[in-house]
Amino acid sequence: VAAGKPLVSGAAIRLEGQLSVFDPRRAESPCYHCLYGHGSEAELTCSEAGVIGPLVGLVGSLQALEALKLLAGFGEPM
């Protein structure tokens, strides 16, 4: 937020993926800290919970798409 730069955040664990775009230049965009705070008490790791390989590739591809949309200035963020 302080730097005013957008963040395209992605995560994957087990069979679940998550993608978020945080853009402080947009009034309706939440900041990372507002949404997640200081983290959760019970954080999972891939080595403990597992993760499906193709899911990681899918989340990464979607992150790249969102970053390109931000750089090119077209479309709406996810």
Image (cartoon, grey):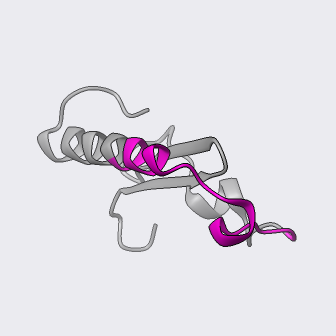
**Does 29 lie within the magenta span?**
no
Q: Nearer the viewer, residue 26 or 44?
A: 44
Mostly what secondary structure, the magenta segment? helix
Q: Nearer the viewer, residue 31 or 45?
A: 45
Q: Residue at x 36, y 73 (%)?
A: 3
- Image location (x, y in percent) of residue 53: 47, 51
Q: Residue at x 51, y 37 (%)?
A: 28
Q: Nearer the viewer, residue 77 or 25?
A: 77
Image position of 61 (left or right of 11): left
Q: Residue at x 26, y 39 (%)?
A: 65
Residue 40 in which image quadrant: bottom right
- Image location (x, y in percent) of residue 35: 67, 53
Q: The C terminus appears in which quarter of the rendering?
A: top left
Image position of 37 (left or right of 4): right
Residue 58 in which image quadrant: top left
Q: What span is colored magenta in the figure? A: 41-60
